[in-house]
Amino acid sequence: MKNILLILACSLFFYSCEDFLNLKPQGMENSDNYMNTEDNAIRVVNGMYDLLGQSEGKAPDGRWLDHHYEFFLGSMVTDDSEKGSKPSDGGGLIELLNWSINPSTTLCNAFWIHGYWGISRANYVLTNLPNSPIDDTLKNRLMGEAYFMRGYWYFYLLKHFGGVPLLEEPVQPSQYGKINRATLHETFVQIEKDLSEAIKLLPERSEYAATDMGRATKGAARGYMARVLSYQLGIDSECDKTWQSVYDQTSAIITSGEYKLVSNFATLFEEENKNTEESIFEIQCLEGTAYDAPASLGTAYYYFQANRVENKGANSGYGFNNPTENLVQAFDPTDPRLSCTVYGIGYNSGILYGTKLKYDRTQQSTNYFNRKAALAEKPNISKSSNRNVLLMRYGEIYLMHAEACFYLNKEEEAREYINYIRARARQSTLCRGFNEGDPTGYPALVSVPNLPDVTSTGEELLHAIWHERRLELAMENLRGWDLIRTGRFLDVTSKVKDTDRLNNTGDDEPRYPNYRENCLRHCIQGKGGIYIPVLPLPLSEVQSWGLEQNPY
């Protein structure tokens, strides 16, 4: 929270607007009346979105903020991927994968600061915009966007730390040391309160002007509400919701007619396909002139995961977040989605965008890289790609709906929606550039993939839905939270990262001895005794505010 006060003091200086300095004077402005014009109000709200793509750079106090991607816990500590890069690279990630991370690790500080930085910007809007004389329709929309972003960032913090201090207005110096940490349940309640307000106030996607594409919509708020509720139902012992709540949200999105599955799965993850009809919420990125935040308009997300070896014309980078052999083996080899999920030494002769690339296995943890984070060519600014980052899409809505149907004894409807996903996969092509010498083609399959409709019932149906989520959403940073909420995290991850690798040699994937025991020491317990792994709160925050530390 020491950091929270710094964020409060500095955040207004980071709102990104191209013509900010060209505004004509309109009287004396201060933090209380700055949003009294529509232009200013929009600029401040735009500043909330700016933080979504800031993966590293200067924090509000000017100090460097380390990488803080959600795939660290969403994929990397699970059975889906490994750290990647050189064995010695990424000290904080090595600690995380060994569960030896500590409260002084910069990784924890980065997640904490980034989350509260986002919350501080939303709180400024929600505190000052209600009294603004601007048009009510615009004001309500902007308020909805702020509620959405605050809910988004509290969920971000909850997934990494559990319950956190809840702030609904800018922090005042007089509050220093007097704000307590909320429980897990109280934090869920706050998130759902914010998202409920966002659902009321936000327009549908089709009601926005084309120039406003990428802003939070009613569909995005409903989608995140469904995701939050699914997580809460699995881990919150005080939860008074049921799967009917998830069903209601996903049904509202489906019946809205605002979204649909793109016909070819392979097109979803290409740079030119921004804001498709399947996109519910994604980070908007532009190729600017700066490498790092806060001046950068692009993202380092793709640079962080790219092949470390330089290949002419191809993107390269740090080489982190390598998909595992276990993930590859989870796919039927005829499933075209596999070609859209991995590339590298172990798959399709290492071809990417029509070229057989060079790799260095000593600088990888596995034989694969994340195909969903691949770029067709190297950006002009390596750490500032203009490719958007897809955070939520309609395919996930279908699978959340199917799971809700299962728990509500609507098995026929559950099978219907999981089979929509499998039917789309059967009709899709291989990824773009799968064939050597053809960088832009989407090769058709030579035979019908072995992806029959799901016909199972009971527990087999539930496990089929979970399995389909792993395949459809692989490397989209949801696996960790799915394993945690379904009570499978410790068993599944320890088996893949420890037991199954007991006799690893040579280029095999790294083993983490005693993974289960090490992780268990850093878990809080939730519903039904479920274990929830969490990061430690930054040491400075615990010491300054007397916050109860997580089990570290």
Image (cartoon, rainbow, N blue to C red):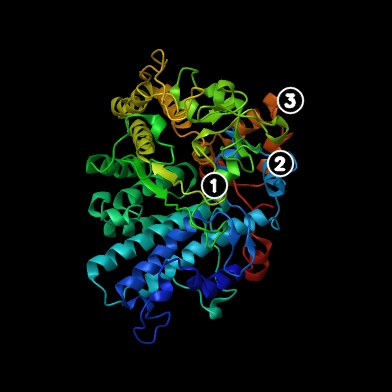
Residue 502 numbered tag: 3
Return the disc, 1 or 3, that comes first in the chain's sequence: 1
Q: Nearer the viewer, residue 363 or 462?
A: 363
Front-most of residues 284 and 78 = 284
Rounded to the nearest whole Å, what is the CA distance between mark 1 and mark 3? 32 Å
Q: Point out the tag, 2 or 1, that comes first from the N-terminus.
A: 2
Q: Position of residue 103 (x, y in %)?
A: 69, 57
Q: Residues within 10 Å of mark 1 (few under 14, many from 20)?
A: many
Residue 358 in the figure: left or right of residue 415: right
Residue shown at 44%/45% (left/top)? 391
Task: Describe the element under mark 3 as helix, strand or loop.
Answer: loop
- Residue type at mark 3: give it: Leu
Tell me which numbered mark, 2 or 3, is placed earlier along the sequence.
Answer: 2
Q: Of the residues tagged 2 and 1, which is closer to the observer?
A: 1
Residue 290's place in the image compared with 172, above or below, is above
Q: According to the image, label 2 marks what residue?
A: 98
Mark 2 Cα within 10 Å, few/some/many (few <14, many 20+)?
A: some
Q: CA–CA distance between discs 2 and 1?
A: 23 Å
Work out which residue is located at the far top of the displayed protein and give it: 447
Amino acid type indicated by mark 2? Asn
